[in-house]
Structure formats: structure tokens, C-alpha cells
Amino acid sequence: MLTLLAVLAFSLLVTLALSHFLVPRLKRFGITGKDVNKEGRPEVAEMGGIAIVAGLTAGVLLAIMLNTFNGLDFNITYVLAALVTIHAMAFIGIVDDLLDIPQVVKAFLPLAAAVPLVAVSAVGSTAIAVPFLGELDLGMLYIVVLIPVGVAVASNLTNMLAGFNGMEAGMGSVIMLFMAALAFLNGRTEMLVLFIPMLGALLGFLGNNWFPAKVFPGDVGNLTIGAVLASGVIIGNMEGAGALILVLYVIDFFIKAWNRFPSSKWWGEPRGGKLYPVEGKVRGFAQLVMRMCGGISERNLVLVFIGMQIVVGLAVFLLYA
């Protein structure tokens, strides 16, 4: 437990330090985005997710060092394969933040990023645990279809329910906390070696991302959250839990699919300190909450989603504990 706390603290401190270093430099070089949920749409530093990736990586590398010198036992090959997939997704996010990859292309690029996980899973378990049904062995279907699709879907989902100060890092922290607890109870150390550093990285980033945000995670941060979740549950063989904990993101996906995945006007229209659906139309889950509340402040909107994610996380934990 002390070892894991050291890894979490190290990831948090690396992310926190790098965030403070990055924010003024990102703004200086014009790497910014408009905070569309505020009056006047102020410019805020973008691509802060680089700090999240750095903190995660630092924590994983520390865990690998502890594996060698301090007896923290886990399969390094699986963890390194997951890290390659995560870094590939982070690279896709960086390119998208800078060059704006078309949505159709971005949806399928994660399939290629999953190759390292496909390689190690070919010699591992091909069964998944389903609540009330037990384990289902999917054989080659798991290796060549479920793994790439899982990485692609998780990454794109966490990149869609986003755009509000603190939402991505806040909900991501809750997800990593509950999944780390499940990993600990089930003895899945490889999952812990990913989820604990990611939890630390997200907590270290959250201070600068909370309302009013000094920095946005960008696609590099949002895609990485989903990639870490997918990679962790794949190497830890807890894919069912990973899928269920994303239920809020799935709801958002279907609302946006109904509206043909709007590229604009998905945000809130600020009036009197509250956010309302743009033009009164619900185009995503966040706007649905705005309408149901008759207008809501951005801070409270994010707290509502974090609260709902805690409820979902608790339900998943009880199912798989």
C-alpha cells in the first residue's frame, strides 16, 4: 500500500509541476482554446493533457523500478504493451489538437494503437467476466476485434463528454479511483500500475483545470483517459467493469448520435451566471442536464456529473468486488 501511495504521489507531483510550467508557455506560443461556456469566451491554454501523460508515465516508470528493486510484483511486458498503446493514443491527441484530424479518421486511428495489446493478449486470457453470467471465452474474436474496438470506443467516448471546466479530469479521477479499488481487491497488480499513476496525474491536473480553468486537457488528455481505462481492464481481464463504468459517456454518445454528432453548439449559453442549451436545443448529455435544471452554473454542472460518476462507480464496484 505504501508503495502504491508513493507512485500516486509521484505522478501527482510531476503533473502538478509540469502543469505550472506548461500553462504560461502554451499561452505564449498561441496554443489556446476558447472557453465557450463563459461570457466573452476567454482564451485558455490548450493541450495541458501533455502534463497528464507525463505524470502517468513517470508513475509507471517508478513502479517498474520498484518492481526491479523493491519487490512490487507484476508482469512488466503487459504494462509496457499498455503504455505503448497509451502513448500512441496521446500522440494521436497531440496531432489532433494541432492539425484537427477529421472525426471519421480519428474514430479509427485507435484501432492501430491497440496493436501492442493485441500482441500480448494473444498469449493471455481471451475470456471476459460478465455479471450474472460468469466468464465467456471469445477466442480470436476477443483478440482481433474486441481489443482494438475497446480501445477505440473508450478513447472516443471520453473525448466526447468534455468541454466544461474540471469535467474530464474530475470524472476521470472517479473512474480511476473505483477501478483501482477493484484491481486492488481482485489482485490485478498490472491494472493498479496504470490506474494509480493515472489517478495521481488527473488529481495533479485538476487544480489548474477546475473552474475557472487555467488550462484545458485537449484531445491529448481526453483520449489518454479512455486509453488508460481500456488498456488497464484489458491487461487485468476486467473488461466488463470497464465497459459499465462508462455508462454516462454512452448516454452522451447516443444523444449526440441522434443529433448527428454536432461539432458546434454542444456547449452552454451563459446567462446570469448559469448555462442554458444553445438555441434551447439539447445536443448532448450536458445540455440535457442544463434543461432539466432550468439553467445551471458550470461549476455545479460539473459537480452533478462527478456525482453521477461516483454513483456509477459505486454500482460497478459492488458488482465486481
Image: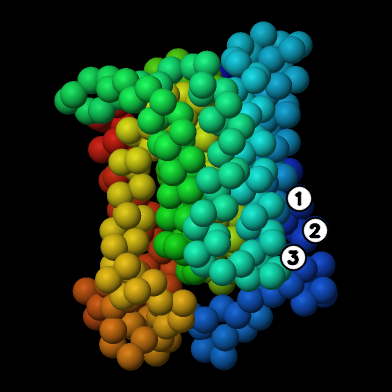
Outermost residue toward the top? 71
- Left or right: residue 316 compared with residue 166: left
Query: Could you tell me the amino acid type at mark 3?
Result: Val
- Left or right: residue 131 compared with residue 205: left
What is the CA distance from the residue labelled 3 to the residue labelled 1? 10 Å
Q: Where is residue 64? Give x, y as percent.
A: 71, 21
Q: N-terminal of the two: label 3 or label 1?
A: 1
Q: Where is residue 254? Give x, y as percent.
A: 29, 63
Is 122 in front, or is 204? Answer: 122
Query: Could you tell me the amino acid type at mark 2?
Result: Phe
Q: Are marks 1 and 2 in contact (CB under 8 Å)?
A: yes
- Left or right: residue 257 compared with residue 88: left
Q: Quadrant of residue 116?
A: top right
274 over 220 or under it: above or below: below
| Residue highlighted by disc 1 | 17
Identify the image quadrant of the N terminus.
Answer: top right
| Residue highlighted by disc 3 | 23
Q: Is any part of residue 307 visible from this angle?
A: no
Query: Could you tell me the amino acid type at mark 1?
Result: Ala
Identify the image quadrant of the C terminus.
Answer: top left
191 over 53 or under it: above or below: above
| Residue highlighted by disc 2 | 21
